[in-house]
Image (cartoon, rainbow, N blue to C red):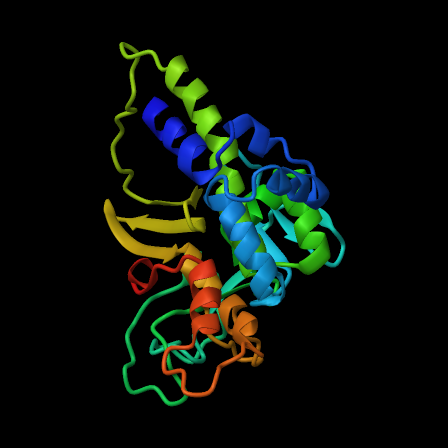
Amino acid sequence: MREFRAFLERHTFGAPLEDVAALADEAALQAWHAQAPEGGDLRLFLTIAAATGLDRLGRGPGRYLSHGNASAPPGLWDEATTSLQPLDLSGLTEDTRHAWLADGGLPPRHPSEGFTRPDADKPEAYTWNKAPRLEGRPCETGAIARRLAAGQPLLRSAVARCGGTVYTRVLARLIELAVVVPQMEHWLAALQPREAFCANDSLPEAGSGRGLTEAARGALGHWLRIERGRIASYQIVAPTSWNFSPRDAAGQPGPLEAALVGTPVREGERTPVAVQHVVRSFDPCMVCTVH
């Protein structure tokens, strides 16, 4: 951890982590950048972002979902109301209208009642990804959602100005490093090596449960049902399931699809740079999503 902190402070930030984590708003960020414009990768990113308009590229749906972890609370941050709403997943459904997955003729279902059955010849389908929706609407997840839920003032300031964009997604990921690494140092120091670290148990004959956590890429949920001592159903909604979800039955695009609308493509570009910026700002993992 000491080596990692040293690398971040020398190369990524060119400053102590605590100084970066304490930046209160975009004005403070700009003043910090001006102190040493060549000092570290974050300052270089800020220079490039300002020159290329990354704060105007790849705007998402404006709703940010965090399951919560040791560094951020659970909740749903809404750009329109600038408020953190309690997390209620009772209204979570997975739409398969445009996925190569069968729906059994049923409406979108909660993951606890869901199933995953391939239908490779399904008309109008174009992805193996389901379309998670909370109360019928898409949500973005990731470091930006965690920092907004945690009330990090710089990210709330930046998102209030330009929304979820390439600039704010990358900025959130960088600021999170400055926030979480010092926390990790405290957690390590608090470990008691001789204490129990695993709670052994046995599977019940019947039951159901869920596990919600924050993976690096965002909100991760597992829903499990056991019958006769065996796993009868196991459904996963991964972070990229949220961010790369296809259109649903109502025609609503997922966060990435919405963010790609209007992305400029220069004449002759076969792999447009701006499209790559938008896609990579979500830090996708389709391997985790196509489960």
For the question of whether residue 134 can be seen, the reply is: no
Residue 213: image location, x then y, percent: 44, 42
**Residue nearest the observer in this picture, 289 or 231:** 289
Q: In the displayed structure, does residue 196 sit left or right of residue 280?
A: left
Camera-side residue of 216 and 232: 216
- Tell me which residue sits at (58%, 67%) in the image: 57
Camera sees residue 26: yes
Quadrant for the C terminus in the image: bottom left
Image position, residue 239 (x, y; %): 43, 55
**Above or below — where is 277 with respect to 228?**
below
Q: Decide if residue 220 is on the left or right side of residue 87.
A: left
Residue located at (51% from left, 27% from top)? 16
Q: Name the residue: 72% across, 43% down.
A: 27
Q: Where residue 184 sits in the image (x, y, percent)? A: 42, 26
In the image, 248 versus 14, the foreground residue is 14
Residue 35: where, in percent of width, then height? 62, 37
